Image (cartoon, rainbow, N blue to C red):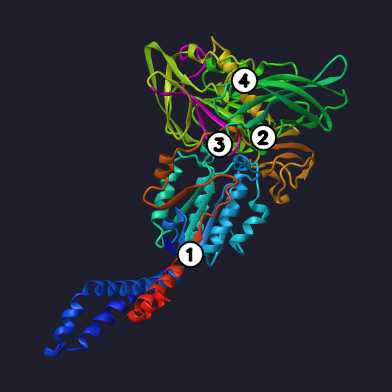
Amino acid sequence: MSFLQPWLLAGLPLVALPIIIHLVNQRRFQTIQWAAMMFLLAARRMARGYSRLRQWLIMLFRTLAIAGLVFAVSRPLASGWLGLAAGGRADTTIILLDRSPSMQERGSGTGESKLETGRKQLAQTLQTIGSDRWVLVESAMNEPYELDSAAALLNLPAAGPASAAADLPAMLRAAHDYIRRNRPGRTEIWICSDLRANDWDAESGRWATLREAFLELPQGARIHLLAYPQAATSNIAVRVTDVRRQATSDGAELLVSLSLSREGDSEEKISLPVQFDIEGARSVVNVELVGSKTELKNHQIPIERSRERGWGRVSIPADANPADDDFYFVFDNPPPRRTIVVAEDAQAQRPLQLAADVAPDPAFQCSAEVVTEDQLSSVEWDQIALLLWQAPLPTGADAELVQSFVDRGGVVAFFPPRNPGDEELFGVQWQTWVTGNEHVAVETWRSDEDMLSRTLSGAALPVGQLEIGGHCGMKGEFTPLATLRGGGPLLARVPTKRGGVYFWATTPAPADSTLATSGVVLYAFVQRALAAGSAVLGKARQLDAGEPDGDIPTPWNAVTEGDQGLSTEASFHRGVYTAGDRLLAVNRPAAEDGASVVADARVAELFHDLNFARVDDAAGNLRSLIQEIWRIFLATMLIALVLEAVLCLPKAARAAGATS
């Protein structure tokens, strides 16, 4: 139990007043032996037990009355965790609100989402506890700004649902920077989130840095977590994986590929009506969902021959989370897929050039150009989709060109040079080559996502059949997509805000690997990298909500109605937009379709040594997280006073009252 006015508990020593008064009264009288009173005293001894008990009860009730009054005016709180977590009025309260699509999941049997429930619980709880200043850091902008009151959360557009993923470490960093910059007094941080693993990034090194930063704050900060970790096992998500326009003998058609996924491990077969909406023209096809994921490949939708550009939407019936029941897409004639190859080894250069030059479909125009490092400044980078680099890592002006290319959304793949140096780029540095008489086998690789995922037919890439004759070590912060026997990385991805950066530990040269002779893996990697890099070059683009808009002009004008939000937050809400001459489809990131939740033990580790408390709530919960129980103590005081008064009545009066 805690108190909104804990300083009034300083009056608790007043409960000793009845005892003190009793002791003082006893010392006012002196005992004198008097023979005439001997018979009266003897008679009184016979009733001493009852009399002493009555006196102790009177003293007890007087003490309880004073204690009840002190507790009542201190405004005690109760209801589970807040009875231990709260502790008086804060000078500054910072609210970290997760607005990601997974927070729009509704509770069973209720119409309220986790986000709506969390906002109501926070508004009610924090309004009761009170604060001198309210600050909101929401997951879309990650920028702190002040609120008039906690109740403003209920109607604030910036606290509503969004399609962008959350970044909890970045939100906590924003809260820490606000505390350090403004130096408030007693500070409390309230986090409202559903603990999705992609939003928390619990394995990131940023958490250790954040923990140390909060521990160094002179005033400290108390952190509360209001968690909604439950996931609805019946929820189904739809996602468009590919859209292509192609000419036919009768006109033209769209080839739309999509995936349906559901949470949980249910093997129940479901026939799901999927609706396709091409600028108002609707059609429905039934898709059978078996297991956790089903894909529909190249569904044909006829369109007019003259329609070369447009937009569409795929929808499924409403379920537990409306945020993943729709997916928007746009289409246009594909832009040319151009590749730049920089290689010091001719035996590695030729396979790279061929893999980038041969188009997988006649609809795509692929070309690969070999250049030297001296020619990089003359390259038309705004027309390049992919950079393949097999040479010492670039430095100086060349490194800046590559960095700008990635920031624009391009993709670069690095292959190790023959003589690795001390150069470092994107936080990665080449180490030494490892060679031997025997080939090294590939031990593991990611077949569920990224560049080594399964093909459209569902077949796995033959990554395990590669033979590695020599590989170069690498040092830095990256995510392995394929590892060699012994644990060394074969292919690694470096995290970036835009674009893609990949490092191969070997080259396609015959002496290094069978990437060229068994060319399926190399070709699939290069073509997928080209597709990702060219996605930012066309006039019709698919964007993840919250993705930096880079070279996209502003303002954005909505073509369809997606999530309702501020016009300044268009890039954070799903829908179709026009920006200049570009047509943009904005959707939730793919990671939001997963139901993985950070384990309880891991959450506790993230806040280790910090002043931290957590409560798990459920969407649609109507019970308050906090309630004042001063009325209980006030009633206790009144009952104690009544009982004390009854015990103080003269014996004769009480006896007469009993017989009447």
Residue identifier under label 3? 231
- 3D distance between C-alphas at marks 3 and 2: 13 Å
Please say if 422 is above or below 127: above
Q: Is mark 2 on a helix, strand or loop?
A: loop
Query: How would you classify the magenta stretch by its main secondary structure?
Result: loop
Residue identifier under label 2? 319
Q: What amino acid is labelled 1 in the image?
A: Ala
* In magenta stretch: residue 503: yes
The quadrant where residue 637 appears: bottom left
Q: Residue 290 carries which label?
A: 4
Q: Residue 90 carries which label?
A: 1
Give the magenta-colored segment's residue range.
487-515
Q: What amino acid is labelled 4 in the image?
A: Val
Q: Which comes before the other along the chain, label 4 or label 3?
A: 3
Please say if 172 is above or below 61: above
Percent coordinates x, y for residue 508 in the rendering: 52, 16
Q: Which comes before the other along the chain, label 3 or label 2?
A: 3
- The label nearer to you, 3 versus 1, is 3
User: On the picture, is 221 further left or further right than 149?
Assistant: left
